[in-house]
Image (cartoon, helix red, strand yellow):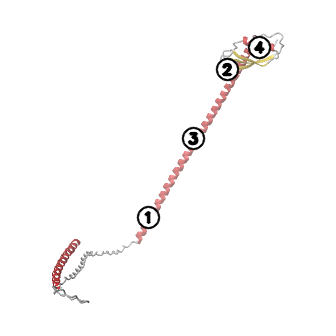
Amino acid sequence: MQRSVSRSSVDQDKTKSLILALLVHAAFIVFLIFGVSWHRSVSGTFQAEIWTDLPKPEEPGSRHPTLQPQPEPPQPHPKPEPPKPEPPKPIPPQPKPVPEKVVPQKQVTTPPKVDVKEENSDIALKKKKKAEEAKAKKAAHEKQMKEMLKQEQEEARKELLDDQKRQKAKAAAAKIKALEEKKAAAAAAQQAAEQEVQLDAFKLAIIAKIKHHTKVPLTVPKGSTTVVKITVLPDGTVLNKVITHASGNPAYDQAVLDGIDRSQPLPLPNDVKLRRQFRDMELNFTHEK
């Protein structure tokens, strides 16, 4: 619809432009015709001149004055062309009328009649059913709580028994350990006593051997005592000997040292542990006649 309206308006514009052009050309031709004829009629007229001074007498031979050519009158300016009329605006298409929406009227339905007795009966049944469900739920919850309590009590009893068993086992282990330690202590004491006896026996044997090889001068008084510290190797060889307490009689002290040298190797026990006890020892020598 819009395209047809625009095409018709364009055709109308073209027609008007063509007519206007023809009119302009016709006016121009008419102007040319009438302008030329007017010019010719004006050129045949006479003009009068006013003189302020008298003219000088004509010279002989010039009776007739010469007519000077008159300037042509100015041509009239062409009239301005009238403005072109504006083309008519296309008429916009009118919108189609929108049909009004028809709102359907709500049908009023009358609710059916309710039987009051039947409704009360249904309400009572629903209440009874809810009460039974609540009762069953409560009973199930109580049963679950009882089972949980029973299980917790059983676990506590087992833990108590386990604790008692552990305590008994711990007490028994402690008792056994104490007995073993006591037994070990007794054995160690007995062994130490035996070692002490052996040590004393070997010390006496070493002193006896050294005394046997000691040549005491006759001038040494009875009861002279000297203490010597010796270092013994595992094979019984004396590595070092030092007098820690002199007797006051140098002759007796020297006699004891010489006796130690003549007594090597010293007698030692076969047990390696006992032999280590004789690494460093002090020996007392008392002269008796």
Q: Which of marks 1 and 3 precedes in the sequence?
A: 1
Query: Dividing the picture into quarters, in which one does residue 45 lie?
Result: bottom left
Give the labeled residue for mark 1. Answer: 126
- Pointer 4: residues within 10 angstroms few (<14), some, or many (20+)? many
Give the labeled residue for mark 4. Answer: 256
Which residue occupies the foreground of this view, 167 or 4?
Answer: 4
Check if mark 2's residue and mark 4's residue have beta carbons within 8 Å: no
Indicate the secondary structure of the residue bearing disc 1. Answer: helix
Is 96 situated above or below 130? below
- Pointer 2: residues within 10 angstroms few (<14), some, or many (20+)? some
Indicate the secondary structure of the residue bearing disc 3. Answer: helix
Per the model, the C-alpha gap separating discs 3 and 1 is 53 Å
Q: Which of marks 2 and 1 precedes in the sequence?
A: 1
Give the labeled residue for mark 2. Answer: 276
> Can you tell which of label 4 and label 1 is closer to the viewer?
4
- The structure residue drawn at horizontal position 52% and vertical position 51%, both measured from the top left corner, is 146
Identified by mark 1, the residue type is: Lys
- Report x, y in % for residue 23: 18, 79
Per the model, the C-alpha gap separating discs 3 and 4 is 73 Å
- Report x, y in % for residue 30: 16, 81
Is 122 situated above or below 166? below
Indicate the secondary structure of the residue bearing disc 2. Answer: helix
Identified by mark 4, the residue type is: Val
**Residue extending farthest front:** 60
Query: Dividing the picture into quarters, in which one does residue 268 lie?
Result: top right
- Pointer 3: residues within 10 angstroms few (<14), some, or many (20+)? few
Give the labeled residue for mark 3. Answer: 162
